[in-house]
Image (spheres, rainbow, N blue to C red):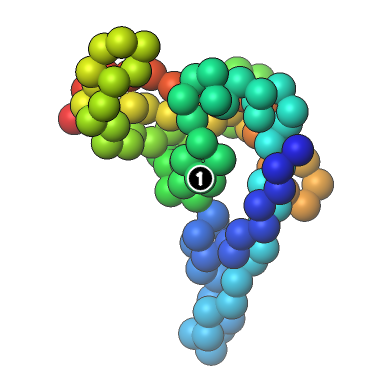
């Protein structure tokens, strides 16, 4: 299992004291072994998962799950075809002091 500890300034935005001083909130990102095993098969790195969780847009998910997605420049071959972009979707749940990534999906094509 991969664990990232990140500043909440990246994950949740900065929090302010009434005096206007910013302080960080720390969040743990854990990647489930299933998701970790599927990532290379789908062409997704741990760094990309981190980027999606911290900077991605909210996406549709079922039940108690949450999801975010982000489009990356790809500009290379995948499965024998050239793709300009890759959209990575991370499905996760909030548990305890952080989040657990359940699965990671990748779509290849072009988005605007």
Disc 1 marks which residue?
A: 47
Q: Residue at x 57, y 26 (%)?
A: 39
25, above or below 66, in the image: below
42 vs 100, left or right, is left
38 vs 32, left or right, is left
- Residue 52 or 33: which is nearer the viewer? 33
Q: Residue at x 74, y 28 (%)?
A: 33
- Residue 107 or 44: which is nearer the viewer? 44
Residue 43 in the image: state x and y as whole percent. Answer: 46, 25
Residue 94 in the image: state x and y as whole percent. Answer: 71, 40
- Residue 46 or 27: which is nearer the viewer? 46
User: Farthest bottom residue?
Assistant: 19
Residue 48 in the image: state x and y as whole percent. Answer: 47, 40
Q: Residue at x 66, y 23 (%)?
A: 37
Quarter of the picture containing the N terminus is top right
User: For numbered disc 1, what is the local secondary structure?
Assistant: helix
| Count of picture labels | 1
Residue 38 image-quadrant placement: top right
Graded by Cα atoms within 10 Å as few (under 14), some (14 to 19) or many (20 or more), the crowding at tag 1 reads few
Residue 54 in the image: state x and y as whole percent. Answer: 50, 50
105 vs 4, left or right, is left
Quarter of the picture containing the C terminus is top left
- Residue 28 or 65: which is nearer the viewer? 28
Residue 83 visible at all: yes
Residue 64 visible at all: no
């Amino acid at each position: 299992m991969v664990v990232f500890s990140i500043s909440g300034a990246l994950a949740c935005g900065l929090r302010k004291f009434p005096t206007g001083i910013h302080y960080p909130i720390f969040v743990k990102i854990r990647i489930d072994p299933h998701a970790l095993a599927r990532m290379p098969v789908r062409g997704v790195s741990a760094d990309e998962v981190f980027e999606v969780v911290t900077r991605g847009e909210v996406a549709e998910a079922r039940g108690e799950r949450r999801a975010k997605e982000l489009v990356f420049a790809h500009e290379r071959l995948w499965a024998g075809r050239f793709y300009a972009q890759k959209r990575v979707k991370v499905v996760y749940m909030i548990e305890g002091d952080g989040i657990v990534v359940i699965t990671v999906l990748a779509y290849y094509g072009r988005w605007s």
